[in-house]
Amino acid sequence: MRYFERALELAERGRGKVEDHPLVGAVLVRDGEAVGEGWYEFAGVQHAEAIALAQAGERARGATLYVTLEPCSHHGRTPPCADAVVEAGVARVVVGALDPNPVVDGRGVERLVQAGVDVELLDSFEARRQNEAWRTWKSLGRPFVTYKVAVTLDGRVAVPGSRWVTGEESRRRVHELRAASDAVAVGMGTVRADAPRLDARDVGAARQPRRLAFGRGPLPDGSELELRTGPLDEELRALAADGVQSLLLEGGPTLATAFIEADLVDKLLVFVAPTLAGSGLRFVGDLTGPLELSRLRATAVGEDVLLEAYVHEP
């Protein structure tokens, strides 16, 4: 499925540029040769499929289109891509994932099938993962929430006598995560104890995330954080209405437990250091029941290990 993998690679070229749109990549193949490629990059340009079709010209007729997301079927800033695919005479379309946007949601695939196009839906996890924040924002009306925490091997969030739990490479990765997030948040306990800045430093961030504190105020004098005091679900809906698609949660165990108990955490990122603290707070408090996780994977980050798992798959 190398052409689909190529489409995923092309889609990534729009990372950080697409604003309220998803990442999309497309590759047209005829007689074993790629005859057109495209990706969506920013508002005002054509969609990935239209770019690939224009590049292919007459060679699109009878070709196979590999596209990471279901072609749109409605008139928005551009004409429907599904119509363009049909009119170009494309014979087969391999779709990475359905579009959760209520104005699409299967209608693009339906349009293709009704026109006699052979459609294969992969329901690819990699395609869904590529747009995980956008998918949650569109389908649930709240940001995609990632809980990031650094712990010792015995699950503690601090090491006696040390400022840091994890190593320098893990700490740099956290700044990269902040730079890639629309907002970063902690609880008021963390604000009072650590006075965190929550900005992305030394990673060439194109923009800074919104920096939030959940809980009862007031904020300390000089704090540059934005206080959010309402119920968590209401605050997340309000953030989503402001265009916040992704929230990186960096608070302590109290805030993490509150988000988990409210079923508002989508993904866990746990940086594990090769250290036994022996005592101290654990990274999450008592839960009312077990939490099932999926897609667990482990990656070495310097001396540490990063564990990633989903509570809700995108």
Image: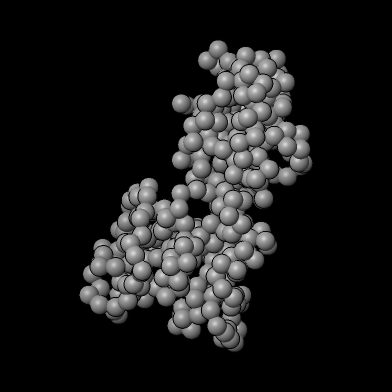
x then y, percent, for residue 22: 62, 44
Q: Looking at the rendering, which quadrant does residue 10 occupy?
A: top right
Q: Give me the residue at 65% from left, 35% from top.
A: 107
The answer to whether 8 is drawn above or below residue 62 in the figure is below
Asked where in the image residue 168 lies, by quadrant, the reply is bottom left
Q: Is residue 90 above or below residue 245?
A: above
Q: Residue, x 56% and y 67% (percent of image)?
A: 233
Q: How is the image coloured?
A: one colour
For the residue pair 126 and 136, the one nearer the viewer reads as 136
User: In the rendered picture of this protein, how many numbered marks are placed on residues?
Assistant: 0
As drawn, 273 above or below 228: above
Q: Nearer the viewer, residue 262 or 130?
A: 262
Q: Is residue 58 visible?
A: yes
Rendered position, 128 above or below 307: above
Residue sitting nearer the eye, 69 or 251: 69
User: On the picture, is 239 further left or further right than 172?
Assistant: right
Residue 6 shows in the view: no
Q: Position of residue 207 (x, y in %)?
A: 62, 60
Q: Residue at x 35, y 49 (%)?
A: 297
Residue 181 image point, x, y percent: 55, 58
Q: Residue drawn at (61%, 17%), measured in percent from left and top? A: 91
Q: Position of residue 180 (x, y in %)?
A: 55, 56
